[in-house]
Amino acid sequence: MNQGALRGTVRLAVDCMGGDHGPSVTLPACQAFLARHPHAELILVGRPDALLPAADWARCRRVEAPEVVEMHDAIEVALRRKKRSSMRMAIDLVKPDDEGVSAADACVSAGNTGALMAVSRYVLKTLEGIDRPAIATVMPNQRDGYTTVLDLGANVDCTAEHLLQFAVMGSALVSAVEGKEHPSVGLLNIGEEAIKGSDTIKRAAELLRAAAASGHLNFHGNVEGNDIFKGTADIVVCDGFVGNVALKTAEGLVAMLSDFIKQEFKRNLLTKIAALAAMPVLNRFKARVDHRRYNGAALLGLRGLVFKSHGSADSFAFEQALNRAYDAARNGLLDTVHDRIRDTLQAMPAHPLTGDNDNPKMMASRLTA
Amino acid sequence: MNQGALRGTVRLAVDCMGGDHGPSVTLPACQAFLARHPHAELILVGRPDALLPAADWARCRRVEAPEVVEMHDAIEVALRRKKRSSMRMAIDLVKPDDEGVSAADACVSAGNTGALMAVSRYVLKTLEGIDRPAIATVMPNQRDGYTTVLDLGANVDCTAEHLLQFAVMGSALVSAVEGKEHPSVGLLNIGEEAIKGSDTIKRAAELLRAAAASGHLNFHGNVEGNDIFKGTADIVVCDGFVGNVALKTAEGLVAMLSDFIKQEFKRNLLTKIAALAAMPVLNRFKARVDHRRYNGAALLGLRGLVFKSHGSADSFAFEQALNRAYDAARNGLLDTVHDRIRDTLQAMPAHPLTGDNDNPKMMASRLTA
C-alpha cells in the first residue's frame, strides 16, 4: 500500500441533505471547495430538486437519493428503513468493490452522528484488528497547533485494548494529515493522588508502554484535561463518554465567555466605544479560536474514510470538513491506519492477526500474551 | 437538628501550612477574613514560628502542629506517618466528642487533595447512608449564577447508588448555602444517539427519578458538558473521573484563551492602544470569570465540614474558601446533608437505615427494593 504517497485526483462523496441546514449550507460549501481544489471531484448525494443548483458544475457528479436521515431519526430508522437515504448512499460510494476500488475516496456528512457511525460501520465494516471505530477531532492548543482527541462519543465503557487501538488510529491520523512521523500520545487521566484513574486506565497505560517499547507508538504518559489545550501531547486518548464531556464542556465554556464579553462591551456608551477600538484585535482573537475552523471529525477504524461535520455547521465550517476529508484521502490515511494497526499488533506479541474484530478478549490476548 | 437555622458564632480551623505557598498566603487571608466577619473565630493550625504573625490577633487561637503534609506526600504518609501534621490536627478539631460537640464548625486546607480526603474520611468517618464522600465545587454559568458540580475526583468507577448519594448531598449543599429549597439536579451524560451513556448512568437516572417521585429530589434529567456553563441545572452529578476531566479541561481552555487574547493585544502599538481603551471592560470581564472567586471545594458526606482550597490559591482565593466554609457552617450544612440523606433513604423503600455505609449493594437494595 502506498502509505503517505500523495494521490492525484481525490473524489469526495457528499451527503448534501445532512445537518440542520442541508443543501443551503452544503452546496455553497461544495462550490467553494471545488474552486479551491482543482484536483478534487465531488459526488453530491441528495434529493434531485435539492441538487439542481449544481446541475452544471464542473468536476461534479450528482447521485439522486430519494430519502433523508433526519437529525432526530433513531439509528434503527437510518439503518433499516432508509436504505436509499443520502447518508447511506454517500457511504456506499466509499465501499470498495471486489477489486478494492471505490467510487469515492472519502465521504462527508453533517447528519446525525449516531446514525452516521452505525451506517458506516454496517456498510464499510471495521479494519482488521479494530474492535470499534472511534470519532476523532482536533482542538486548538497553546502551542498554536492542534491536539487530536479521540474517542468523542462512539464508545462508552472502553477496555484498555480499545484505548490502545484509539492511540494507534490517532497516531496514524496525525502522521498522515500533519506529516508527523512519531506523534506523541497522552492517556487522559486525573491528577488526583487519591485514585490516579481506574483499573482500565492503568491497564491501558501498560499496553501503551508496551507499544512504545516496541517502537510502534510515541507514548507521552498520562495527561489531564488541561493538557488538551496546553498541547502537551499531539494526541489525547480517552473513552467516548469522557471525550464527549470534555468537548461539550469546552463548547459550553466558550459560549458563556463570548456571551459575557459581549455583555461587558455593550454595557454603556463608553464600553461601546472601547469595543470599536478593540474590535480588530477581538476579531483576530475570535478567528484564532473559531471552532468552525476545527470542524470535521474523522470516523477512524473503518474500511473507508468517513468524516462528520457538526450538524449546525455553516458553509464555512462545512467546507473545513470537506478540506479535512480531502487531506486525509490525499495523504492515504486509510492505508496508514491499516498499516499501523497491522504493524503494532504484529509487533506486540508473536501472535498472527486473526482478523477477529469483534472479540476484545482475543485482542487482549494478542496484544499482551 | 436545627436545619437551616443560622448559627451565631462560627469557628473555623485553618491548616495554615497547606498549599503551594503556606502561611504567606493563608495568614493574610485569615486576617482579611476576620476583619470581614465579626462573628467568626479562627483556630490557626501550623508550625509555631509560622503562626507568630497572628500572635495578637483577636478572635483567633493558635494550635501548634510540628509536622506538615507536603503537596507531594503520598496518602499513606499523611495518614500514618504524620499524625501531628497541621492538616490532621485541623481536621481533628472538627471531630465531634461524645456529646457531639466539636472545637471547630468546619476546617479549611489548601493541602494535597488526596491526603485531605483520606485523612478526613479516616478521622471523621462518613455520614450514615453515605458510601463515599464526594468533592463539590461551583462553576459560573450563563444565568449569572453558579452550577454546583460533583464529584470532582474523589471517586472513579462510581455506581448508580453513589451518583444518587452525590445528588442528595449536592442538593443539601445548594439548599443550605444558596437557600434554594428544591435545587434541580442534572445527570451528566452524552447526547450521542449512538449510546446515550453507560448502564451505570441509565441506572442512576432510574434511581434519581425514583427519588424525585418520592419528592426528595428535583431531578432535571440528563445534561451534557455544555449545560454546566449554561446553568441548565443547579447541580450536575457525575463520577469523579469525568468531573475532574471536565474541570481541568475548563481550566486549560481558560488559560489558553487568556494567553491568546494577551498575545493579540500585545501584537503592535495599535493593538496596545486598543488594549488601553478596552482595559476597563476586559478587567470587568476578567473579574466576572475569575476562578479565584470560585475557590473552595466542599468535601461532602463526612461527619464534619471540610473545605479544600486550590493548592495554588493566593490570599484572595484562600479567603473565598474560608468564606465558603463559613457560609456552610453558619447555615448548618452538616445537619442539612444528614437530614436529606436520611429522609431520602427512608422514603425510597420501606427499609430502615442500617448504617451499613460500605456496602453499595445494601444501599442499592435499600434504595430500590
Image: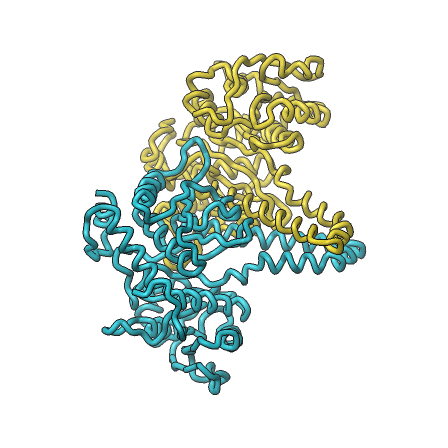
Chain colours: A cyan, B yellow
- Given residues A251 and A290, the one toward you in this image is A290
- In the picture, the quarter occupied by the C terminus of chain B is top left
Instruction: Please determine whether, in this image, residue B57 is positioned above or below residue A204.
Output: above
Q: Nearer the viewer, residue B331 or A101?
A: A101
> In the image, is residue B273 above or below residue A53?
above
* Quarter residue B350 falls in: top left
The answer to whether B280 appears left or right of A18 in the picture is right
Q: Is residue B31 left or right of residue A39?
A: right
Which residue sits at x=58%, y=34%?
B176
Q: What is the quadrant of the N terminus of chain B in the image?
A: top right
Quarter of the view holding residue B333: top right
| A77 over A180 or under it: above or below | below
Residue A114 point in image, percent of width and height: 38, 62
Where is residue A91? Give x, y as percent: 35, 71
Query: Which residue is situated farthest in the right direction here?
Result: A270
| Spot occupied by residue A264 in the image (x, y as percentages of width and height) | 71, 52
Residue B348 in sight: yes
